[in-house]
Amino acid sequence: MATVKDQYFGDVNDYRKYGILRGLIEGSQLRLGVCWLRTVNDGRQDGEFRQYLQRPERWRHHDPELYDALRRLLDPGVERTVLHAESWGLLPGARYHHRVLSDGASERRSYFAEAWQRFREAQLLFLDPDNGLEVQSVSYGKRTSAKYLYWHEVEEAYGRGHSLIIYQHFRRQRRDTFVTDMADELQYRLGGSRVEWFRTANVLFLAAVRPEHSGKFREATELVRHRWNPQIHYAVRAIV
């Protein structure tokens, strides 16, 4: 079954995304779980930003091993699928939850019950919804809800002992304000966490770091910043 994640696999946003995750697990040695939140392909044709794979002089130096792996997508007959992340070893040592997520509330609860079991040993959990965190216009269990991650799921994941990385599309508002608002909400929901973020030209990656992981995570962010400047910008929410 083709999914939204498949149609975007290997585009420039994916290159940056895997680059962040690779830097974090290499620099921190935290065990990573990847919860894709895969949804059925929506038929859109905007997942074609792969020109960077033909410009190694500009892009390869950020993560040569990752870049060379993704260039396999230029070979005739290579399927575009997120499952390559595991089969090609893009995220060493990671565990994955590949099941497709649907809109229904009961199916969604089953999906996450299975995910929590799969990720029992993970310390760092990457949550990758199509659009990001919930919006008021899409209620839990309703049509298109599979494209979002809901706050109570974030709270449960953190409560199970995971530090979190959350994929978030920018919305139609001033970006600096949006980033601040999302970081503040995450801090409010997960009191005691260290809220940080990685920002690219198109995507925001929110992080909620548990106290027991903060030292290792801080070292890993330095690795990401070194490799990916100026493609990826890192910041920490001020403690107030």
Image (cartoon, rainbow, N blue to C red):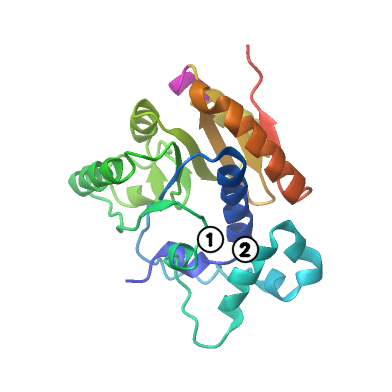
Nearest to the observer: residue 176 or residue 83: 83
Q: Is residue 196 visible?
A: no
Residue at image mark 2: 66
Q: Please, is residue 49 above or below residue 240 in the view?
A: below
Residue 172 percent across, percent down from the top left: 60, 44
Q: Is residue 24 visible?
A: yes
Give the numbered dot on residue 194.
Answer: none
Q: Please, is residue 77 above or below residue 104 in the view?
A: below
Residue 12 percent across, percent down from the top left: 64, 62
Nearest to the observer: residue 117 or residue 126: 117
Q: How many residues crowd around disc 1 within 10 Å: few (fewer than 14), some, or many (20 or more)?
A: some
Q: Residue at x 39, y 33 (%)?
A: 154
User: In the current view of this chain or complex, which residue is farthest to the bottom?
Assistant: 76
**Tag 1 secondary structure:** loop
| Tag 2–tag 1 contact (CB < 8 Å) | yes
Q: Residue at x 47, y 49 (%)?
A: 131
**Which residue range is magenta in the image?**
187-191
Give the numbered dot on residue 90.
Answer: 1
Nearest to the observer: residue 158 or residue 100: 158
Magenta segment main secondary structure: helix
How far apart marks 2 and 1 lie (CA) works out to: 7 Å
Lateral position of residue 143 relative to residue 195, left or right: left
Lateral position of residue 89 relative to residue 154, left or right: right
User: Closer to the N terminus: mark 2 or mark 1?
Assistant: 2
Q: Please, is residue 125 above or below residue 218 in the view?
A: below
**Tag 2 secondary structure:** helix
Residue 238 percent across, percent down from the top left: 66, 19
User: In the current view of this chain or complex, which residue is farthest to the left?
Assistant: 106
Q: Residue at x 18, y 45 (%)?
A: 106
Q: Amino acid at mark 1?
A: Leu
Nearest to the observer: residue 216 or residue 84: 216
Q: Amino acid at mark 2?
A: Leu
